[in-house]
Image (cartoon, rainbow, N blue to C red):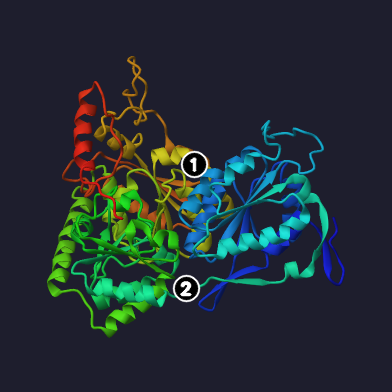
C-alpha cells in the first residue's frame, strides 16, 4: 500500500507503523544517545511475510535487517548484541506463527533471566477469525483466545497481543519503556495477528516522532545509605560479590576505585567476571561452585557480604552452603528491589555506579579501609591460586594432544584486552570462571543465568555486530555445537569474522562428570555407539564436526597437537572471514586438569538405590545438605 499523509495523520498498515515507530526510538544515559532497536532479525512465513516482511521492504535502510536460520538463534544473536551494547541498544526478532513463534521461547527465557532486552514480534493467528482454525492454529476448547504465543507470557517482562491497529500505540510505548528500564528489562513480546499486521489505520504523526528513553541512574535512599555505611564500618571481613549489574551499569571503574580505596576483596559471579581486571589487587576471582579457592575461602569466613548487582543463584551461594559464618550479614546493592532484599539483606536500592560512588564517598569521609592483615591474607591467597592456574595452563610438550584447560592456556597467551570470549554451557564455564584472566570489562561473555547450549555461535554474531573491530571467539564443545550450528551460514552471509573453537571430547563432559558423582554412572552422556547390552559404551561416533562447519561455509583449521593449536589460533585471530579451529582434546589427569570444584552444588541424589555408586553418592549428599542454611 502506498504511504499517504495528512497534516496530522499518516495512513499505514499496522506493520508499517510499527517499523517506522521502532526506527525512531532511542535510549540515553550519561549524555550518550543510542538507537534502541538498531536492526531486525527475521525468518518469514505466512504469518509475517505480508505484514512485517512488506513493512521491512518499504522501510529500506531505516531499519537494517539480518536473515536468520533458527528462531531461537536469532534471539541469542539479539541478546549478544544487547549485552555487548551495555543494554542501551538491542534488536527485534520477527517470526511466523506456529513453530516459528514457539521456537522463540528458549531465547526469550534466556533474555529475561539475564535481564537483557530483546523485542520479539511473532506472527499470530487471525484476530478476525475468517476461518477457524487456520494453518498452525492451536485450538483450546475452553479458551478461544489462546494461541501458541501465550507460551511467551511467562518468559516475557511485557506481553501484548495487538488485536486492533490502534492498540499498537499504548502497547508499543509500554514495550519501549520496559526495554529501557534497567530494573525491568528482558524479553518483550508483541504478538501480531497476521490480518492486523496488514490492516491500514490513520496513525497520529506524533507516534512517529523521535522519542528518547532515559535510562535512569537511581540514587540510593539516604537512610539505606547510612545503614549500609554502618554495616561496612562495623565489619571485619567484608567481601564484595560483583554480579552482572556492575557491567550493565558500566560501573567497572567505580568498583575499581571503591576496592582500591577500601581494600575490600572482590569476587565475581559468572555475569560479573571482568568487572575488575584480573591484575587488580582486590580481584580474587570467581565465587561459588565454579569459583576460586581464594574467593570461596573468603566467602566462608566473611562477616559481611556486599552483593553488587547479583541475583545470588545457587552456583554463587553453593546452594546455601558457602557463607558459613554464623553471624554473616548481607548488604545488597541492586537496581531491582526484588534482588536487593534477598538473603535477608540490608537493601541499598539504586544504580550500581551511582550507589557505589555514594557508598565509597561516605566511607572515605570516615577514613575506612580493611585491616592490613586481612588484605595480606587475600593477596597471598590470590598469588597461590595464580600458580595453580599456571599449572593447569602449562603445555610442556608441544607435540601432545591438549587438554581443555591447555586450550584455554594457549588462548590466554594469544589474546589482548580487545578479544571477547563467548561461552554458555558444558564444562567450559567452570574452567573459565576459575581460570580465565579477564583483561577488560567486556572480554568475558559467559551466559550462565540460563546456561543455554547453542547460545555461543549466534551470540557471537550479535557481539561482532556490536563490536566490529574486536576479535570475537565462540568456544563450544561438541555437544553444544550439535545443538545449534546453523548461524554459521549467517556469519558467512554477513561476512562476520567470528572465530569458532570446537573442542571435541565425544559427549557431554560436564554432565557426564556430574552423572558419575551422583550415582548415575555417566549414563547416556557420551557420544558413542550403542553396544549389544544396550549401553552407549562403544566406539566414538564417526562424526566430523570440522567437515560440518566447512560445509556451512567456514574456513576450518584442524589442530592435533599443542603446537598446531597455537598456530591455528593465531591464524584464526588474524582472519577477516569466519574461521573455525577444531581440536580433539585429551582427558586430563588430576595433575594436568583444572582444580576441582571449591564449593558444593545441590543436585539431589536418589534416596533409595540398589547400585553401590548411588548409595555412596547419597551419603555424600546427606553430608553436604547438613551444612546448608537459610539466610533470613
Which residue is at 50% across, 48% downward?
A: 109
State the CA–CA distance, disc 1 to disc 2.
39 Å
For the C terminus, give its image quadrant: bottom left
436 lies left or right of 490 = left
Which residue is at 44% across, 75% downward?
A: 219
Q: Which mark is residue 149?
A: none
Q: Secondary structure at mark 1?
A: loop
Q: Is residue 269 in view from this perspective?
A: no
Q: Is residue 205 in view from this perspective?
A: yes
State the image coordinates of residue 51 (x, y, percent, origin top left): 75, 50
135 lies left or right of 498 = right
Residue sitting nearer the eye, 262 or 58: 262
Characterize the local packing of mark 2: few (<14), some (14-19) or many (20 or more) Cα atoms within 10 angstroms. some
Q: On the image, which quarter does residue 200 sit in?
A: bottom right
Mark earlier in primary sequence (1, 2) = 2
Which residue is at 16% across, 45% downward?
A: 591
Characterize the local packing of mark 1: few (<14), some (14-19) or many (20 or more) Cα atoms within 10 angstroms. some
Provide the residue designation for mark 1: 484
Provide the residue designation for mark 2: 218
Amino acid at each position: 500500500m502506498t504511504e499517504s499523509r495528512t497534516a496530522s495523520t499518516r495512513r499505514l498498515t499496522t506493520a508499517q507503523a510499527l517499523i517506522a515507530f521502532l526506527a525512531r526510538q532511542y535510549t540515553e544515559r550519561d549524555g550518550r544517545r543510542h538507537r534502541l532497536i538498531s536492526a531486525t532479525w527475521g525468518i518469514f512465513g505466512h504469518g509475517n511475510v505480508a505484514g512485517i516482511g512488506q513493512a521491512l521492504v518499504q522501510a529500506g535502510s531505516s531499519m537494517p535487517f539480518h536473515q536468520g536460520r533458527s528462531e531461537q538463534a536469532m534471539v541469542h544473536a539479539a541478546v549478544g548484541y544487547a549485552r555487548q551494547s551495555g543494554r542501551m541498544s538491542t534488536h527485534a526478532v520477527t517470526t511466523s506463527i506456529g513453530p516459528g513463534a514457539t521456537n522463540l521461547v528458549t531465547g526469550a527465557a534466556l533474555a529475561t533471566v539475564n535481564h537483557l532486552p530483546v523485542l520479539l514480534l511473532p506472527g499470530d493467528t487471525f484476530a478476525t477469525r475468517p476461518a477457524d482454525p487456520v494453518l498452525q492454529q492451536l485450538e483450546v476448547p475452553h479458551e478461544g483466545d489462546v494461541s501458541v504465543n501465550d507460551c511467551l507470557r511467562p518468559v516475557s517482562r511485557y506481553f501484548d497481543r495487538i488485536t486492533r491497529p490502534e492498540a499498537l500505540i499504548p502497547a508499543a510505548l509500554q514495550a519501549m519503556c520496559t526495554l529501557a528500564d534497567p530494573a525491568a528489562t528482558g524479553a518483550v513480546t508483541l504478538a501480531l495477528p497476521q490480518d492486523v499486521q496488514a490492516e491500514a489505520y490513520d496513525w497520529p504523526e506524533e507516534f512517529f516522532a523521535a522519542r528518547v528513553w532515559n535510562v535512569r541512574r537511581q540514587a540510593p535512599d539516604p537512610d539505606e545509605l547510612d545503614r549500609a555505611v554502618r554495616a561496612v564500618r562495623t565489619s571485619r571481613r567484608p567481601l564484595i560479590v560483583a554480579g552482572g549489574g556492575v557491567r550493565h551499569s558500566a560501573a567497572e571503574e567505580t568498583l575499581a576505585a571503591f576496592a582500591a580505596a577500601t581494600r575490600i576483596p572482590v569476587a565475581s559471579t559468572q555475569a560479573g567476571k571482568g568487572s575488575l581486571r584480573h591484575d587488580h589487587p582486590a580481584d580474587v576471582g570467581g565465587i561459588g561452585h565454579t569459583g576460586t579457592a581464594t574467593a570461596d575461602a573468603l566467602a566462608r569466613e566473611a562477616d559481611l557480604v556486599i552483593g553488587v548487582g547479583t541475583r545470588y543463584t545457587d552456583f554463587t551461594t553453593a546452594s546455601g552452603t558457602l557463607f558459613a559464618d554464623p553471624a554473616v550479614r548481607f548488604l545488597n546493592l541492586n537496581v531491582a528491589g526484588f534482588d536487593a532484599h534477598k538473603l535477608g539483606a540490608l537493601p541499598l536500592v539504586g544504580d550500581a555506579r551511582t550507589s557505589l560512588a555514594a557508598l565509597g564517598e561516605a566511607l572515605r569521609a570516615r577514613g575506612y579501609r580493611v585491616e592490613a592483615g586481612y588484605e595480606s591474607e587475600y593477596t597471598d591467597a590470590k598469588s597461590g591460586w595464580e600458580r595453580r592456574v599456571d599449572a593447569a595452563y602449562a603445555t610442556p610438550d608441544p607435540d601432545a594432544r591438549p587438554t581443555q584447560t591447555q586450550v584455554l592456556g594457549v588462548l590466554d597467551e594469544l589474546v589482548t584486552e580487545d578479544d571477547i570470549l563467548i561461552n554458555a554451557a558444558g564444562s567450559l564455564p567452570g574452567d573459565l570462571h576459575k581460570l580465565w584472566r579477564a583483561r577488560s570489562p567486556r572480554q568475558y561473555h559467559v551466559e550462565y543465568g540460563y546456561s543455554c547450549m547453542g547460545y555461543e555461535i549466534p551470540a557471537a554474531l550479535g557481539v561482532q555486530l556490536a563490536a566490529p573491530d574486536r576479535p570475537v571467539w565462540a568456544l563450544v564443545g561438541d555437544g553444544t555445537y550439535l545443538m545449534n550450528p546453523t548461524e554459521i551460514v549467517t556469519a558467512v552471509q554477513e561476512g562476520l569474522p567470528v572465530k569458532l573453537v570446537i573442542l571435541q571430547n565425544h559427549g557431554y563432559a560436564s554432565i557426564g562428570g556430574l552423572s558419575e558423582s551422583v550415582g548415575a554412572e555417566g549414563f547416556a552422556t557420551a557420544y558413542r555407539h550403542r553396544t549389544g547390552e544396550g549401553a552407549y559404551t562403544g566406539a566414538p561416533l564417526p562424526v566430523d564436526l570440522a567437515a560440518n562447519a566447512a560445509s556451512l561455509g567456514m574456513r576450518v583449521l584442524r589442530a592435533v597437537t599443542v603446537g598446531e593449536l597455537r598456530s591455528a589460533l593465531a591464524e584464526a585471530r588474524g582472519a577477516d572471514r569466519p574461521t573455525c579451529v577444531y581440536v580433539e582434546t585429551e582427558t586430563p589427569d588430576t595433575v594436568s586438569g583444572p582444580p576441582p570444584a571449591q564449593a558444593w552444588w545441590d543436585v539431589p541424589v536418589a534416596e533409595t538405590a540398589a547400585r553401590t555408586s548411588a548409595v555412596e553418592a547419597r551419603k555424600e549428599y546427606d553430608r553436604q545438605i547438613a551444612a546448608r542454611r537459610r539466610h533470613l
